[in-house]
Amino acid sequence: MPTQTVPTDTGWLVTAFHLERGPGCEAVAERVRQLRARILFDHGRRPEFRKGHGVYTDDQELDYGAWHFVARRQAGGPPLGYVRLCTPEAGELFQTRSFLGEEQYRDFLLSHGLGTAETFEHSRLVVEHRARKLGLGVHLNAMAIAAARYLGAKAMVGTSGTADGQDLFHARFGFRHVAGTRRYVERYTEDVVVMMYRSTDGCGAYGALVDELEEAFPRLVRPVSELDAAEWSGGSADPAAGSTPVSAAISAAAPAAGPAVTEAQGGEPCWRPGLFDLQRPGDAAAFEALMGSGRVREVVDTVADQLVELVTCREPALRGSPEGVERAVAAQLAGRPVREYGTWVWYPWSGRLVHLLPRDEFRLVRTDRNRGRIERPEQRHLLERRVGIIGLSVGSSAALTFAMEGIAGAYKLADFDTLSVSNLNRLRAGVHHLGLNKCVIAARQMLEIDPWLDIEVFTRGLDDATMPEFFTGGQGRIDLLVEECDEPRVKLAAREWARRLRVPVVMDANDRGLLDVERFDLEPERPLLHGILGETTSEELKDLTAREKVDVILAMVDRSGISAELEASIARLGTTLSSWPQLASGVALGGALTAEAARRILLGLPRPSGRFYADLAVLTSAERSVLA
């Protein structure tokens, strides 16, 4: 069966198969049971799942007649996660039925208008420790729901643990607690509760993923006869056949590896790093060639410390147990030498070679302190988004803040200008950047925060010819625009495109903390710039004089609301002042304001159109003090 590609936001290879009693099935069932039991044993937390040293057991007749889903990170890699979907043909053996008892289970179905022929059971969702918190559990849960819907399920039932919030996890997909069913189960060493899902109820935040996987399900299926032992050990057979790589959207956009990344790209200064995976023979050879080239000025390898951060981010309780941390790191490495684990990143503009965790693990650790404000499912959702930024002077603060906070995994940056000495009062750049295009500076700095970001640069700025490419071309369409340029015609033309394509726009005016939001995604008929310029079009703003440009920009930001300092400066422009007065503090504030607005918009949180002032002079005035 040929490999199929299904583009989603995760990077997992999933194989689906249906087990019946017959030749070859018992051996596969035993491998499934060993995999589940080893993960469920959880270093001794559930001792009943181990028979003896290295021997684990989870024998259940339910395995026959059920669908099984096994996930890997890459072809040939070991299984990292699993879920089971039990069909009505095995309904007499459902765990839910056993948990409730025959009479209560029958009454439960009747009370919800369900029959046995349309009720499926979801069970045994397990993920290896080294693959947790990377979205695999979400993907497998969505896969089970998708398969059930494809197979005609009206409802799904299942028992869920509660100690680690598994029940709350299922609730995010639309599963609901069944009242009066929670009780302690010795085998699982925790309280267990029955949960139910109806196919007509949707899947909450994961509806799009479930829809996509429901369509993909038939292409994931492999006959049991095609499965072999290599698929369970990470051997050299071809386990990709019949599996579906589900990460084309982000992975395909990753920069090319190795010294092929030169000092210039397409005649422009280099701004993309090279990525090396030493477990790939071609990368290993290119890496050794780079090391011997004399171009590497500094090697930074802290991956051992990063591994400790990774395992303690997943399990904070390990912080008090050096032995536990050591065991978790060893399990994460899974026998690989530390030098070959993860990714080596080559930054040709600085001559630095940096060793990092693999992409998803790196991002998990890098954004761990976002949790509580931006939870991991939201973090993954944001990484699917693409943001366009026009104007990388004031906009550079937004670009770097977005990259640090994880607001989008892809960007388009547009600015024709290069860095000059007078820009150093507000741009985070060094004297070694003088003369370099501002897009390139921002892209380099962002990729030094996260080398897997997908960044396109428009170093000649935007005009009628390049506007379509910026909004919809290249690697893909933008989901949000941050507009920070000084050219009135471009400001208006960008909004014309944004409104046509229903792209929301945010802008910081860099005076009095003015944040401007236009929700063209929700209000496609909304007047541009809130109607301040009436029916004026970008075409009418061609060939303006310098004075006329100043007047139009002042109209765009509402001259009546500007600060006294800016008002006093206007008459001096071109005489005693060379350009608009701007400060680093105002630019930094603008990055924060646009980031907060963009994050809320991209996550579907309330952020209405309008103009909002975060005037620090007013907000920190004496009368605003909260002290007596």
Image (tube, rainbow, N blue to C red):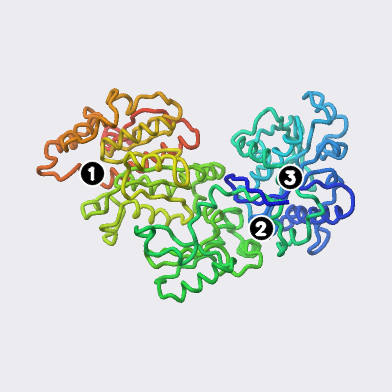
Q: Residue furthest right?
A: 22
Vertically, is 433 above or below 110?
Answer: below
> Where's the C terminus, which quadrant?
top left
Residue 22 position within the rendered picture, expressed as x and y whole percent measured from the top left? 90, 50
The mark found on residue 582 in the picture is: 1
Task: Classify 625 as above or below 449.
Answer: above
Give how far across and how far down residue 289 sits, in percent. 48, 73
What secondary structure is marked by label 2? loop
Say whether residue 628 is visible. no
Q: CA distance from mark 3 to mark 2?
A: 35 Å
Residue in the picture at 41% in, 75% down: 294
- The residue tagged 3 is 190
The crowd level at tag 3 (other Cα within 10 Å; few <14, some 14-19, many 20+) is: some
Q: In screen coordinates, is 573 left or right of 104?
A: left
What's the residue at 80%, 30% (across, down)? 118
Mark 1 → mark 2, Cα distance in angstroms: 53 Å
Looking at the image, is mark 3 or mark 1 earlier in the sequence? 3
Instruction: Answer with mark 1 or mark 2, whichever residue precedes in sequence.
Output: 2
Classify residue 286 as left or right of residue 395.
right
Callout 2 amino acid: Ala
- As helix, strand or loop, the secondary structure at mark 3 comes to strand
> Residue 234: which quarter of the image?
bottom right
- Taking 131 as reference, is 93 left or right? right
Q: Position of residue 580 (x, y in %)?
A: 20, 42
